[in-house]
Image (spheres, coloured by chain):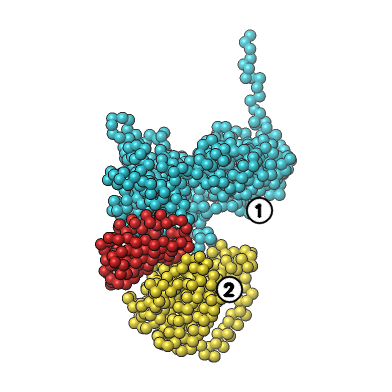
Chain colours: A red, B cyan, C yellow
Amino acid sequence: MEKHQFEFHGGRVRAPKAAPALVGVASSGNLEVLIEPAKLNGACRIEISTAALGFGKIWEAVLRDFFERHQLSDVRISVNDVGATPAVVSLRLDQAVDEFTRPAS
Amino acid sequence: MTAKPKNLTRDWGTQPANRIARLRRAATLFPGKEAPPEAIGRLLAAVIESGDRVCLEGNNQKQADFLAKALAALDPAVVHDLHMVQSVLALPEHLDIFERGIATKLDFSFSGPQGARLARLVGEGRIDIGSIHTYLELFARYFVDLTPRVALIVAEAADRAGNLYTGPNTEDTPAIVEATAFKSGIVVAQVNEVRDTLPRVDIPADWVDFFVHSPAPHYIEPLFTRDPAHISEIQVLMAMMVIKGIYAEYGVQRLNYGIGFDTAAVELLLPTYAADLGLRGKICKYWAINPHPTLIPAIESGFVESIHSFGSELGMEAYIAARPDVFFVGADGSMRSNRAFCQAAGHYACDLFIGSTLQIDLAGNSSTATLGRITGFGGAPNMGADARGRRHASPAWLKAGRESHPQDGGMPRGRKLVVQVVETYREHMEPAFVEKLDAWKLADTAHMPLPPVMIYGEDVTHVVTEEGIANLLACRDDDDREQAIRGVAGYTPVGLARDRRKVENLRDRGVIRRAEDLGIDKRRATRDLLAARSIKDLVRASGGLYDPPRRFRNW
Amino acid sequence: MKQSYHEASARKRLLGVLDPDSFVELLPPQARVTSPHLPALDLPVAFDDGVVVGAGALNGRRVLAASEEGEFMGGAVGEVHGAKLTGLLERAVAQKPDAVLLLLESGGVRLHEANAGLIAVSEIMRALLAARAAGVVVIALIGGTYGCFGGMGIVAKCCDVVIMSEEGRLGMSGPEVIETAHGVEEFDARDRALVWRTVGGKHRYLLGDADDLVEDDIAAFRAAAIRALDAARPPTLDNLLAEHAFLAQRLHLFGTCRDALDIWRALGLKTAESVALLDTAGFLEAAEKIRLRG
């Protein structure tokens, strides 16, 4: 397993509710994304645990684009990855934000 | 007195005479055309001569497996140096024939499952490959310079006279038999059963010299059955882009493709997503394609007018028989396929080919070649190529032609749409986009005259990935083209090396279109959009007519 | 529209079976109670260790519920996973809810966790029987992709009620395990029709191992779970003796059969060959008069 941590600053969007959200499953070619509010001085922190070794640069590129899309602040995102492709990673991250920012029913 | 023309001194009938000699040898073994199964080895030894060109019917799906075994069991001291010509190397026996020293030379088209062993035997100098062909090329050469001396074929049934019934998997049989029987060759057929009367005659008895009732039914592979349970959300997203960004855009009515999960997603979105877009009756009406089960919902929802097929698909027999308006069904109720005609249809009569691949380079060349395997081509290169001999027009063909040939007063042309749909990364993080295809290295190590490219970049019109559609027709020069491909290559090294400003410029020009540019909401890209999500859904959609092979069931 | 239970995730199934917005999760993902063993083997963990547990309502009645995620390590039971299930069942003894729902999808013990996993499964069984002894009905729902095998197959049969779909599978050794141990001649795990007629929902229902058979639809599982709320079978000595007698008689009747088809014919199912193709309603009708009831 390989660990990566990234922090992005300057995000404008604060989560409207406090409930964390989990999407996806840690299974082959897939990942689970846990997203929760956290007091991080406005940062968006993303922690990756991945079974695919040596793709740090690609994670950084994928996550930078993700941050550009959503501009989250004071949010902690944790990922258990089992070799998902960047396409699946981006999709799960977007789904997690969707779930997280959806007004509570 | 004038001299006799020199030609009159030549014997013009050596081939028929040789044929009669072979038949006489066989006549000592058993009376008539029906060979007892236990005599098959002696029959082959009697009608095959060393150095013969022999066609062993190995198709994409059905296999003359009994005859293949018998051929591989011949004594190489008696029969040797055969030149095998066959479409597909699928069974171990196809290569045993070479390993045992019975044959030495090979001309073929596709070798999927035997690709690694073939590469090894070639490397050891045990097989001399003439050429690797597309199906159409190989069939064509049967009538030019690779005419078989002996054809070992397979059919469903024979009657006592030797008429053959192939059933829905007619496949290559007519092409092989025609080339052999009309050039004084010998045709031997294995059949699953011998009947007094046949449902219909696919091959007339006077083209068939011998038939044998094989002890077990011939092997047949459900090659094109895709379980919808394995279609991913990413494939659904790409399918939405294909439908909205290409099929609807060009009004594609006649099409053909390489069947995979990407294309299964497209057809399973026709009754849902495409119908919602109001595209029923406007796209995907006429198909040159095998009758595979994931087409059922599109057929049932009224998208499909007609389907002609290369072969059949196990389990689809009753469904096909019940839809004679759609399929090519004989008076007996079963389908007749024909690989040669369907390949011609795919090349000349279709406006679009769509398929997936393993690697694409910066010029758009694509290849499924991997090192250590010689897998050949099959039919994709003919269907995934602009048919430059085509002259009849259609709206989709004209629109593509207008895009690729600027309206500058030059000669207007039409153009076939050739679409490659791939995820930027395959499983295990293998990038689909590369600077240089592995095909170059393979050509080098396997001493091929050319790198084995499946579809040349100049024929590709669109590349679709989860990142969007690159319209290569709208590219003005090689740099446009390279950046358009990089622009949809996502996070692969090729994609990350893109010129970001140039890519944004291409997006402004509509050369690259992302999902959002097409008005596609990515959040809708879920499996819920599929018209069937399991094999059982397909059975239901067929009204219980589709009978899936056991390995695809979960009931 | 039907929501496939088979295809849904463990969370989606659980939320769909329970009353809307009623579920409160215990040890949720953000608590990060993950396996202590998997990182030592350099393997990925899941934030919930592959099982969702908590409290909710079913048709307005108070229930505790758990749902296993087959996609994470085949739903296999590790130490944490097992402790969550055991804890839930022990909580049932203390709180006496109207029922415990177990949405099972598991290959059994997580071999990577060896003894900890084995002990966990036996603890689940003990806690389950304690809950039943305390008067709480325990209901198993089986319809996931990975089936319910090994130790969790036994856990399922320890419940008061077993609800299955046709797609669900229930057994001890899984098909691949049998093939590996006894050879492909004994059992061809790739012959899916054989697999399903041996361990699938329809066969289990005919043999009396499953009490209810439903469509592959989350709403259908929910309806069946509601029907089962009052179907307690207290683990009394009389009930146990009756069950043993039932099993002995079943073995006597079918012990020499080589294939499920033989059993179906012996049961008097006239069209045994077509059982696989019957839809759920048609099958229930055909099975009504002849199925065994445990």
State whether discs 1 and 2 lie on one chain: no
Q: Are marks 1 and 2 in contact (CB under 8 Å)?
A: no
Q: Determine whether the residue tagged by mark 2 lies in a helix, strand or loop.
A: helix
Vertically, is A13 above or below B423? below
Residue B211: % across, % down: 64, 45
Q: Residue at x 44, y 81 (%)?
A: C88
Is C85 placed left or right of B213 in the picture? left
Give the CA separation, mark 1 to mark 2.
31 Å
The quadrant of the rendering that contains the N terminus of chain B is top right
Q: Residue furthest bottom?
A: C237
**Chain ID, mark 1:** B
For residue C236, say whether it is visible: yes
Task: Give the residue pinned by disc 2.
Answer: C263
Q: Residue at x 41, y 61 (%)?
A: A4
Task: Give the residue pinned by disc 1.
Answer: B215
Q: Determine whether the residue tagged by mark 1 lies in a helix, strand or loop.
A: loop
Amino acid carrying label 1: it is: Pro
Vertically, is C16 above or below B494? below
Vertically, is B151 above or below C114? above
**Chain ID, mark 2:** C
Residue C273: % across, % down: 54, 67
Amino acid carrying label 2: it is: Ile
Neighbour class for label 1 at 10 Å: few (<14), some, many (≥20)?
Answer: few
Residue C109: % across, % down: 53, 73
In this rendered view, identify the residue nearer to me: C290 or A26: A26
Residue B455: % across, % down: 45, 41
Vertically, is B135 above or below C143? above
For residue C146, say whether it is visible: no
Neighbour class for label 2 at 10 Å: few (<14), some, many (≥20)?
Answer: many
Q: Residue at x 72, y 38 (%)?
A: B25
